[in-house]
Structures are given as structure tokens and as C-alpha cells.
Amino acid sequence: MSPESAFSLLKDCTFCPRECHADRLGGELGYCGMSSTLFAARAALHMWEEPCISGEKGSGAVFFSGCGLKCCFCQNREIAIGDRGKEISVERLADIFLELEQQGAANLNLVTGAHYVPQILLALENARSRGCRLGVVYNSSGYEKVEILKLMKGYVDIYLPDLKYLDAKLSGAFSHAPDYPETAMAAIREMVEQTGECCFSEDGYMQKGTIVRHLILPGHTRNSIRILEYLHKTYGDRIYISIMNQYTPVYHQEAYPELNRRVTEREYKKVLDAACDLGIENGFFQEGETAKESFIPPFNYEGVLSNV
């Protein structure tokens, strides 16, 4: 299926696992909170990704508005629910890609763009026809349909998905998606099949491969350790695993009081010790004070609108 023909799926939208059947082409809002019109909240060099993604150059991150998952603890909630963002055309998105390349970005980083795949692929084709040569990072919640991911083969160089849960009760409670575990496992399997073994440039930037992120939630280290066990047993050294302790309790949770605090040093150490015991070598962990609101990017429309 071509990007052009994929647009037809937005008429009765089944683009994400929610399969909400909204007529997004006709202007209806899907579960993601968006119609077929592109909205983005930020397009700028981003220094806070994994070292092989951001490096010293910075990753050219485009933060799209809307999300098909909408976790109750989302740190990017203001754009995930579609409240912030500026309308742009496919042509403007292609311009943004070229502008990020001109700024010296190490790559193009598509942040939560699953509901805009046809538009993104057309913008990539446009930008490449005009000389853009940056590799593409697909930054995802992991809640993706395999048949949609297949559309992206040949366009994406690096997949950067989350694996948030292997416990359907947790994914049902925190993301209203009890099918998240099996859906994300299938999606990651497709991602790894597309990218194959990880490879890097001489200066340390990843050129091809899959990095699976896992954000530890307070009080749920058992879920985290299950995820590490699954990933290492299934993929071994074919992927990298990024273990994150940056959970920030931005929104007060009445129903889930355990989410109203940060992850403790003891909890993080427990998960890292488990990773060492499993023999995980291809991985990243976070040091220092990452759990604070200053690590959430300002969604101030930087780089989104044309200066012309």
C-alpha cells in the first residue's frame, strides 16, 4: 500500500489498535484526538535522547499533537490530548525536515506520529526529492498495528518504541488498553525484523536498529523486570534497551496514589541489578536528576511555523 492509498484508511479510521472508525478525512476526531489535518507543537534540535540518537549534534525532533494511547501519567499530556499544536501542511512538514537538516541535526525524530503515517511518509518523500539525507527515527509508544508499520519499511532507519507493560491489568488501568502487551510485542517484533542488527557510524551515532525504552513506574518494578526478561530472552544483543527512571508525577492521580511519587533509588537499582543479572550489555540507563519537569520540552511551536 502506498502512502497515498493509505489515506483511504482515515475515512473509517482503523489506523491504530483502537480502531475507532472515525471519519478523520471528513473532519471527525479519532481516539487520538485529531482529524487528518497535521498538527505539531515543536520542531527543534533535541539533546535528551539516548547518546547514539542525540549525541552532540542533537536529534531533529518533531513533536506531533495527539496520541492513540494517552497514558494517565503522560509527561507530554498537553500535546497528547491535542490541546497544543499548530496546523501545518504536508509540504510544510517536508520543509521542517529540510530545516532541521540545515541546523545540523543528527537525524529526523518523529515523536508520536502513528496517527499521521500517510502524511509523514509523503513529507519524507517530498524532502528526499529535495535532497534531505537524514536518517529517520520513529519514536513510538509501542501501541502500533503491524500492518501500518509495514508501510514504513524503507522509510525508517531506527525504531525507538516503548514497552510500557507486560501486565494487562496495568495497561488497562493506566492506559485503558488491556491489549497493550500483545500489541506492543507484535509491533516490536516487526520493527526488529525491519531494521535487523544495530549498526553505528564511526562517531557513535546509530544508523540502523531498534532501541526499546522502558519507563519504570513507581511501585511496579516487577512489571519492569518481566519486560527486561522478555526482551533479553527474545532479542538478546539484536536490540538496545533503555531503562528510564525519569517518571515525573506531573498530574495528581486520585485512583492510583502510587503514581503520585517518583521512582526511588532503591527501585531503580533493583531494576538495574536485574538487568545485570540477566546479562544485558546493550543498554542505556539514566544518571542524575532526570525526574523533573525541566526535562519536558517546551511545546511553544518552535520551528513549526514558517519564518518566510
Image: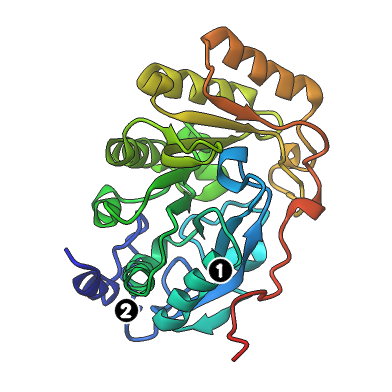
Badge 1: residue crowd in 10 Å (few <14, some 14–19, many ≥20): few
Q: Residue at x 33, y 39 (%)?
A: 195
Q: Residue furthest top?
A: 277
Most distant residue in the left direction: 1
The residue lying toward the viewer, choosing from 9 and 154, is: 154
- Check whether the beta carbons of the residues at disc 2 and disc 1 lie within 8 A of each other: no
Please name whichever residue, 78 or 189, is drawn nearer the observer in this view of the structure: 189
Residue type, label 1: Gln
Residue with the mark numbered 1 = 102
The location of residue 219, given as percent across then percent down, is 70, 29
Location of residue 183 by image quarter: top left
User: What SS does tag 1 mark?
Assistant: helix
Colour scheme of this structure image? Answer: rainbow
Residue at image mark 2? 23
Residue 294: x, y in percent?
A: 81, 54
Rendering coords of residue 148 (x, y %): 28, 56
Q: Nearer the viewer, residue 171 or 97?
A: 97
Q: Quadrant of the C terminus?
A: bottom right
Quadrant containing the N terminus in the rendered view: bottom left
Q: Residues within 10 Å of mark 2 (few under 14, many from 20)?
A: some
| Circle 2 SS class | loop
**Marked residue nearer the N-terminal end (2 or 1):** 2
Q: Is residue 170 rendered to the left or right of residue 19? A: right
Q: What mark, if any, has residue 15 been given in the picture?
A: none
